[in-house]
């Protein structure tokens, strides 16, 4: 069949919207009609050519929501008409990671997915007889896509896909960093460094979990205002002109001199990693969710690491269990308990995906969503 898609033909070149061929699902695969997809910084990271694992030509997008239209042989967990969210990390429930409860690290299709291919080592997309590669097992910048059965989470059909699609990456990453990785509980104090989409989700997650003090830290007054007025931050700090010591002092002033129970870093820079380490209480937890570039290193005095309790953790995919968490968070949103709708700043059609990516890269929006009509 033919489907319109935004294709990354070469690294660093703008996406081109074109009609491409899409083969039907094979054994263990599912065809999904994408209803909406968020635009994530990771998509731009790959398109720009900075991603060392980027493969071209490919169809980007990994933050989608849609409806199952066809299933391949052997598929039993979903059927045509089911509403689903594609997963860039699958949940096979059979590999060592899944059996140990770390389904966010599932290895079932990691080798082929990393090559931009389906589990059988081939692609379902093509253009003029040449293959186009899949992206993160999802390729949601297409009206229709084919994904592995294990790369889908079924969700409430009454939920708005333009909003729940954001759970596919950014919102889940931030929310899970607070609730799953950070283990925020009632009465905790939390600081979130970086108030982009991921950071705002961490703030909202911390409040939902019962944190009584949630400190938003950023260099943008506009983002800090949104963090407080829309996502539940109780305090804000503009760190633009502060030294690391001054930032630590301000956080300690807001927490009775101790520092926070959980510090969440959502920027992905060595400076903010260090800041997160020092603004926590001696027994506090540090959660690193901002993704660094391959050449970055983190330096901390060994005695400071040795002399502090608590923990230092990275958070991948929000340490979520997709089959459990995605439907649950959709229901929380449906109940009005989680402000998922507030993340959507702009809606575009597929032809506007490139300009929307540029707006996002400039920090002008939390999330833009592509609507498929």
Image: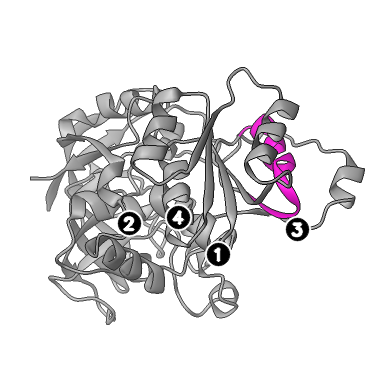
Q: Name the residue beneath numbered marker 1.
A: 185
Q: Check contact, mark 4 vs mark 1: CB within 8 A.
A: no
Magenta-highlighted residues = 269-287
Residue at position x 33%, y 23% in the image:
358
- The answer to whether residue 275 is seen in the rendering is yes
Query: Does 274 appear in magenta?
Result: yes
Q: Name the residue beneath numbered marker 3.
A: 310
Q: Name the residue beneath numbered marker 4.
A: 207
Residue at position x 59%, y 25% in the image:
239
Q: Nearer the viewer, mark 3 or mark 1?
A: 1
Q: Nearer the viewer, residue 188 or 295?
A: 188
Nearest to N terminus: mark 3 or mark 1: 1
| Residue 18, percent from left and from top | 17, 34
- Separation of disc 2 and disc 4 at Cα? 10 Å
In-image side of 227 versus 131 (left or right): right
Nearest to N terminus: mark 1 or mark 2: 1
Nearest to N terminus: mark 2 or mark 4: 4
Nearest to N terminus: mark 2 or mark 3: 3
Nearest to N terminus: mark 4 or mark 1: 1
Q: Is residue 303 above or below residue 91?
A: above
Which labelled disc corresponds to residue 338?
Answer: 2
Q: Quadrant of residue 284?
A: bottom right
| Residue 128, percent from left and from top | 21, 38
Q: Nearer the viewer, residue 222 or 55?
A: 222
In-image side of 124 versus 199 (left or right): left
What colouring does the structure picture have?
one colour
């Amino acid at each position: 069949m033919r489907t319109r898609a935004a294709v990354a033909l070469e690294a660093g070149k703008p996406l081109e919207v074109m009609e491409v061929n899409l083969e039907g699902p094979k054994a263990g695969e599912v065809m999904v009609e994408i209803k909406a997809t968020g635009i994530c910084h990771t998509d731009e990271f790959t398109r720009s050519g900075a991603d060392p694992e980027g493969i071209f030509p490919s169809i980007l997008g990994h933050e989608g929501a849609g409806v199952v239209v066809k299933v391949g042989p052997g598929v039993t967990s979903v059927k045509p008409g089911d509403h689903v969210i594609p997963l860039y990390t699958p949940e096979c429930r059979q590999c060592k990671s899944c059996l140990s409860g770390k389904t966010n690290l599932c290895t079932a299709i990691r080798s082929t997915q990393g090559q931009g291919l389906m589990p059988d080592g081939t692609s379902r997309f093509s253009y003029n007889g040449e293959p186009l590669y899949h992206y993160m097992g999802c390729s949601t910048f297409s009206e229709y896509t084919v994904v592995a059965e294990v790369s889908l989470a079924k969700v409430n059909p009454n939920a708005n896909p333009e909003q729940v699609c954001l759970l596919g990456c950014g919102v889940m990453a931030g929310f899970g960093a607070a609730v799953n990785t950070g283990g925020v509980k009632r009465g905790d104090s939390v600081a979130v460094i970086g108030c982009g989409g991921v950071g705002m989700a961490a703030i909202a997650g911390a409040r939902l979990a019962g944190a009584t003090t949630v400190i938003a830290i950023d260099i943008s007054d506009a983002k800090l205002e949104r963090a407080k007025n829309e996502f539940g931050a109780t305090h804000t700090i503009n760190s633009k002109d502060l030294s690391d010591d001054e930032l630590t002092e301000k956080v300690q002033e807001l927490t009775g001199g101790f520092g926070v129970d959980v510090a969440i870093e959502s920027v992905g820079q060595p400076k903010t990693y260090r800041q997160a380490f020092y603004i926590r209480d001696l027994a506090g937890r540090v959660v690193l969710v901002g993704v660094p570039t391959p050449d970055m290193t983190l330096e901390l005095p060994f005695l400071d690491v040795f002399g502090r309790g608590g923990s230092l953790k990275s958070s991948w995919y929000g340490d979520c269990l997709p089959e459990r968490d995605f439907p649950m968070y959709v229901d929380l949103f449906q109940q009005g308990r989680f402000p998922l709708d507030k993340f959507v700043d702009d809606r575009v059609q597929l032809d506007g995906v490139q300009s929307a990516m540029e707006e996002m890269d400039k920090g002008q929006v939390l999330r833009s969503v592509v609507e498929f009509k």
